[in-house]
Amino acid sequence: MKNSDKGKIIVLSAPSGSGKSTIIGELMKDPGLKLGFSISATSRKPRGNEQHGREYFFMTESEFKEKASRGNFVEWEEVYPGVCYGTLVSEVERITGQGNNLIMDVDVKGGLNIKKRFGDEVITIFIMPPSKEILEQRLRSRGTDSEDTIAKRLEKSEYEMGFADKFDTIVVNDNLEKAVDEVETRIRNFIEK
């Protein structure tokens, strides 16, 4: 397969509760974008009905760090003490090698590291919540996290929003349909050039 037959990489990053997963879900319905979704690996426990190999590849912290030491990740980060997230090299190769465009849901540092590694083959999009108050409402309405976890996520969101201007583009998700359209337009422009 020629390099030109390989798919491109689309990175979406955002604070937890910004609507990033919902936007990705909507984009995945468009066959014209030829999107494949990268399943991330994590050392955290499954939440709700999450299943290994569907939402995440769940592994223990030691399994995760062993894979990291062997260079099996394109990017990875210890997001909270003992809780790691990362993208397996095998996932990137599987999707782009089939000629599909890889859409990735990664944290801000991971997104910037992927851009550094793959350059022009990547577009980075930061999904910005309309306000901190709305972000907090969204996190609470999920009903999946403890108060302590919500507090940690809100504190982390401040840090993450500080990286927004380092991304290729920022989309504010104050209206889901509008945000999906805006992200879709930017992706189309990127994959068609």
Image (cartoon, rainbow, N blue to C red):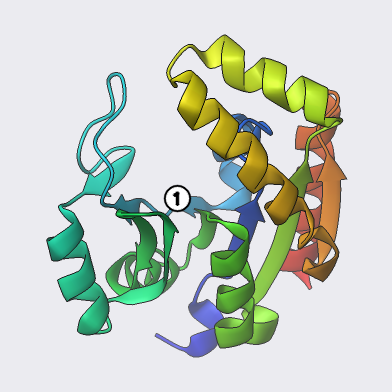
Using residue 5 as the reference point, say whether residue 17 is left or right of it: right
Instruction: Decide: is 94 above or below 164.
Output: below
- The part of the image, by quadrant, that contains residue 88 is bottom left
Residue 29, given in percent of the width and then of the height, sits at 56, 33
Instruction: Decide: is 27 above or below 40.
Output: above
Estimate how packed mark 1 is, as few (under 14), some (14 to 19) or many (20 or more) residues with alpha carbons within 10 Å. some
Residue 19, given in percent of the width and then of the height, sits at 66, 31
Using residue 149 as the reference point, say whether residue 64 is left or right of it: left
Residue 178, given in percent of the width and then of the height, sits at 86, 29
- The part of the image, by quadrant, that contains residue 112 is bottom right
Instruction: Decide: is 16 above or below 11.
Output: above
- The part of the image, by quadrant, that contains residue 154 is top right
Using residue 146 as the reference point, say whether residue 113 is left or right of it: right
* Residue 113 in view (yes/no): yes
Using residue 182 as the reference point, say whether residue 21 is left or right of it: left
| Residue plotted at (66% across, 85% down) | 119
| Residue plotted at (31% across, 26% down) | 47
Does dot 1 land on a helix, a strand or a loop? strand
Judging depth in this view, the residue of 174 and 80 nearest the camera is: 80
Judging depth in this view, the residue of 184 and 158 nearest the camera is: 158
* Residue 29 in view (yes/no): no
Residue 83, given in percent of the width and then of the height, sits at 33, 51
Quadrant position of the C terminus in the picture: bottom right
Q: Amino acid at mark 1?
A: Phe
| Residue plotted at (38% across, 62% down) | 86
Quadrant position of the N terminus in the picture: bottom left
Judging depth in this view, the residue of 154 and 93 nearest the camera is: 154
| Residue plotted at (16% across, 74% down) | 66
Q: How many marks?
A: 1
Question: Which residue in the structure is indicated by mark 1?
Answer: 37
